């Protein structure tokens, strides 16, 4: 019956008799149009999953090209202009088209209504509109790429982007403007759903921490993204009409752009990481069979991160001639953000303590997240202190820092979540040993790629150059070798997850014996999620409740 | 199965079950909401959140205005004096009237008066269009004076006001250049506001047609209410724009 041999909690139904439920959201309707015009949050999540995976591999290809160029100190693969376009496209695609929508638009879309006991998000049509806006934004980005690329860097720094470059800045800015509205609508939908669509008994403090994390991230999406939108509109107008709002020769202030841009783009970092933290909370609890230690603290730390996240943007501008006093305040606030982040890490560690830990793939990715995010977060504190920042900013130290947070943190969390909920989304298991191999490969490849970059940055190698002094070559070769391993680590899940769609073991309702509402329904779920509105009569992560429920089921059925 | 959740525990709180009370379902009730009340609340909550994003959107421009007004105060005063207060005031009155008609329209929908609702929506549209007409007139005047930022921008009115029959103090050339930033912000802010009005007027046509069809005369008023929120928001943005752009530190021409 179950494969409970030693170190796994995996419990699958008898494979000789098990079947995918006859009626579910995947086979409820047929034909391409039934997908393209759907209002079902689960189908939209799948649409998003396919599109962000597509853009992830495009962005990844640019990362590969960047690392290939940096294999040797000389600029031998591409010209400097082309190299600038590579890292710009890598940044734009990975941030706006992959990281920002990664967990919220796929897992969040799929799971939040189910976790709250609702039939759908509050506004299904707006949810679908969000996906179309994303696709339009993505298409425009590809258009900018095909027409000749953009080379401003993903930050669109003025006056570089407005006066000195003759590339497709306006197209790319339009793309991000539109994709930004996709993100706003996702956030808006989540907030309204969480406020208004909870099932009876689902109080705020019975919600899974995944939902809390998305609530905090949604606040950031709703409040931050419009500011980016207006900043990009102003850049486009400046380019089109030369009106001078960011042009110092006409009295404009380039720093104003920096303020507007980072007012979104720093909170955007938390838009990217908070949903990942939500995933980790679910996974850690499930695979240590314990309620999350300090549930309330973890829930509030998400909101605290969102709140503090709005008041640290100037730490991107310490070397840009801002006032010393404001730099001092922003440095202090930056260090304050480390507190709620650390609360999460410590609470996860305490959840593990004396838990019945098992090492399934999602758990391996989560361990990867905890370690790498901690390193990424702590180096963020280095960068937040004024003296260190002047030495380290605009070097590879920065690159390593945010890749530890974004790739080591968020991408690990994304993969943890995809593996964890894959049985729920598709009804089938992924191959366990191969996926463990992928998790380990990713971890090794990641460290090999980005640890050398900390050293490179500390030694003074600047970012965004396609040539470097020969003494940096050894570390760069290590980094490029690591990127190759990392590439394999990301290709593997893509392949075996596709394989599992047809050949994976039937998962059953609750393969992980997890407590969330989503695990109490069939996999894949019905279009309407629940046959009748559920009533939440227990706390989140209540494993005793689950044990009782399973026991009752056995006695009544048997 | 999921039903186990609802049925296995005998102590479930009965009182919290929604959707038990008698209520005739409207055709506009969407399947995923438990009750119409929930649907209506979700809709208006969503609208408020959307307006919050709009505030942040305009906020970026207000921030820029604040910054440059502090830096280039004389230029902002001189350029602001070129805006027509009578037209601005008339437009403010027109917009408030339009907002008033909208508010009456929401009331008419709530008390299910179809004809009154249609009339009020049409009046709202008429006043909205009138506002845009005056705005066009103002823009056109700026175009003729070469006060539109860009390559054709002309500062001579500010460096040599006497030649234009103005009793202003002339600005030094570098400060006069800064009037361009004022005019850019003027066009960006009022233009973005006008764009919101144009979108609103397009929505008004659609709502008027639906109201005429009788969609909102049987208790389903959410679209009218939510559009009302949007329209009042557009009014309020103007209520901030008018004093900031037209009135602040305006002095009578000596």
Image (cartoon, rainbow, N blue to C red):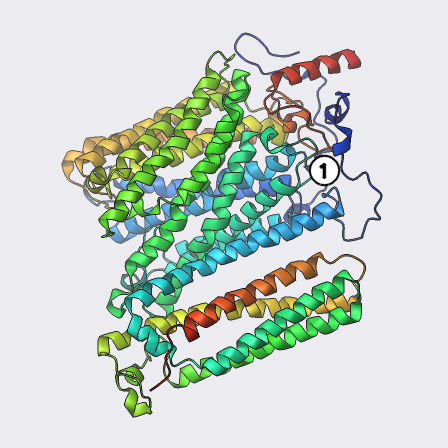
The residue that appears at 62% across and 29% down in the rendered structure is A424
Q: Is residue A438 visible?
A: no
Q: Residue at x 77, y 21 (%)?
A: B10
| Element assignment for label 1 | loop
The answer to whether B56 is drawn above or below residue A26 in the figure is below
Q: Chain of mark 1?
A: A
Query: x%, y% of residue B77?
Result: 34, 75
Going 40% across and 72% down the picture, which residue do you hit? B248
A279, above or below A120, in the image:
above
**Residue pictured at 71% horizontal, 72% vertical:** B120
Q: Position of residue B163 (x, y in %)?
A: 29, 91
Q: Is residue A117 visible?
A: yes
Q: How many marks?
A: 1
Instruction: Read off the residue under disc 1.
Output: A528
The picture places residue A181, in percent across and down from the top left corner, at: 51, 53
Q: Is residue B130 above or below residue A533?
A: below
Q: Is residue A471 left or right of residue A152?
A: left
Viewer-proximal residue, B230 or B30? B230
In the image, residue B7 above or below residue A87 = above
Quick one: B83 or A209, which is closer to the camera? B83
User: How dense is the environment of label 1, judged by Cα within 10 Å: few (below 14), some, or many (20 and up)?
Assistant: some
Q: Quadrant of the N terminus of chain A?
A: top right
Q: Nearer the viewer, residue B232 or A256?
A: B232
Q: Residue furthest top?
A: A6
Residue A161, image x, y percentages = 31, 59
């Amino acid at each position: 019956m179950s494969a409970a041999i030693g170190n796994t909690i995996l419990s699958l139904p008898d494979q000789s008799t098990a079947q995918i439920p006859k009626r579910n959201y995947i086979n409820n309707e047929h034909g391409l149009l039934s997908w393209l015009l759907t209002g079902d949050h689960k189908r939209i999540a799948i649409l998003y999953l396919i599109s962000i995976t597509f853009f992830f591999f495009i962005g990844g290809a640019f990362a590969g090209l960047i690392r290939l160029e940096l294999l040797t100190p000389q600029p031998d693969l591409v010209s400097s202009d082309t190299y600038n376009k590579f890292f710009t496209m890598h940044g734009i695609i990975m941030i706006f088209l992959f990281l920002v929508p990664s967990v919220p638009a796929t897992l969040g879309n799929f799971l939040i209504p189910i976790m709250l006991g609702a039939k759908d998000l509050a506004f299904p049509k707006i949810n679908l509109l969000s996906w179309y806006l994303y696709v339009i934004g993505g298409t425009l980005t590809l258009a900018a790429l095909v027409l000749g690329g953009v080379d401003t860097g993903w930050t669109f720094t003025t006056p570089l982007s407005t006066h000195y470059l003759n590339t497709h800045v306006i197209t790319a800015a339009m793309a991000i403007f539109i994709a930004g509205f996709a993100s706003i609508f996702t956030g808006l939908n989540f907030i309204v759903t969480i406020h208004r669509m909870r099932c009876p008994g689902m109080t705020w403090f019975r919600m899974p921490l995944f939902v809390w994390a998305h609530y905090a991230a949604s606040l950031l999406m709703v409040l931050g993204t419009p500011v980016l939108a207006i900043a990009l509109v102003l850049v486009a107008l400046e380019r089109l009409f030369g009106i001078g709002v960011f042009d110092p020769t006409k009295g404009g202030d380039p720093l104003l752009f920096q303020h507007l841009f980072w007012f979104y783009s720093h909170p955007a970092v938390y838009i990217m990481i908070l949903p990942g933290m939500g995933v980790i909370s679910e996974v850690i609890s499930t695979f240590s069979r314990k309620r999350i230690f300090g549930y309330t603290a973890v829930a509030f730390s998400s909101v605290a991160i969102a709140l503090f996240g709005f008041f640290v943007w100037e730490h991107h501008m310490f070397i840009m001639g801002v006032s010393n006093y404001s730099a001092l305040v922003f440095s202090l606030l930056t260090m304050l953000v480390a507190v709620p982040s650390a609360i999460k890490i410590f609470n996860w560690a305490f959840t593990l303590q004396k838990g019945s830990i098992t090492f399934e793939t999602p758990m391996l990715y989560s361990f990867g997240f905890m370690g790498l995010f901690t390193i990424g977060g702590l180096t963020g504190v280095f960068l937040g202190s004024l003296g260190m920042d002047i030495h380290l900013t605009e070097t590879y130290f920065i690159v390593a820092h945010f890749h530890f947070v974004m790739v080591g943190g968020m991408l690990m969390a994304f993969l943890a979540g995809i593996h964890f909920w894959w049985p729920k989304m598709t009804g089938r298991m992924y191959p366990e040993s191969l996926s463990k191999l992928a998790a380990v490969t990713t971890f090794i490849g990641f460290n090999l790629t980005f640890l050398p970059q900390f050293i490179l940055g500390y030694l003074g190698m600047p970012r965004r150059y396609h040539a470097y002094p020969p003494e940096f070559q050894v570390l760069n070769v290590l980094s490029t070798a690591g990127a190759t391993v990392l590439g394999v680590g990301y290709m593997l899940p893509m392949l075996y997850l596709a394989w599992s769609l047809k050949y994976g073991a039937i998962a059953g309702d609750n393969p992980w014996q997890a407590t969330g509402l989503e695990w109490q329904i069939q996999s894949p779920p019905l279009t309407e999620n629940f046959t009748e509105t559920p009533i939440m009569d227990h706390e989140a992560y209540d494993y005793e409740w689950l044990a009782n429920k399973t026991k009752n089921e056995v006695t009544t059925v048997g | 199965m999921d039903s186990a959740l609802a049925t296995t525990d005998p102590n479930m709180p009965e009182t919290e079950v929604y959707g038990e009370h008698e209520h005739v379902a409207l055709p506009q009730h969407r399947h995923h909401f438990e009750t119409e009340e929930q649907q209506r609340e979700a809709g208006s909550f969503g609208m408020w959140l959307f307006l919050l994003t709009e505030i942040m959107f305009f906020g970026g421009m207000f921030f820029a205005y604040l910054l440059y007004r502090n830096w280039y105060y004389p230029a902002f005063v001189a350029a602001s004096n070129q805006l027509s207060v009578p037209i601005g005031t008339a437009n403010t009155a027109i917009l408030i009237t339009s907002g008033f008609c909208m508010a009456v329209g929401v009331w008419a929908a709530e008390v299910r008066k179809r004809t009154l609702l249609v009339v009020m929506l049409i009046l709202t549209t008429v006043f909205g269009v009138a506002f845009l007409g005056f705005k066009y007139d103002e823009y056109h005047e700026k175009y003729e004076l070469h006060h539109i930022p860009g390559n054709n921008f002309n500062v001579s009115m500010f460096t040599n006001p006497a030649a234009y029959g103005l009793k202003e103090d002339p600005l030094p050339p570098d400060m006069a250049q800064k009037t361009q930033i004022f005019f850019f912000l003027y066009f960006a802010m009022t233009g973005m506001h006008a764009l919101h009005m144009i979108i609103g007027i397009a929505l008004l046509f659609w709502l008027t047609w639906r109201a005429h069809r009788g969609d909102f005369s049987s208790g389903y008023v959410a679209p009218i209410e939510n559009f009302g929120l949007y329209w009042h928001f557009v009014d309020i943005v103007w209520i901030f724009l008018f004093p900031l752009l037209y009135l602040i530190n305006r002095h009578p021409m000596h």
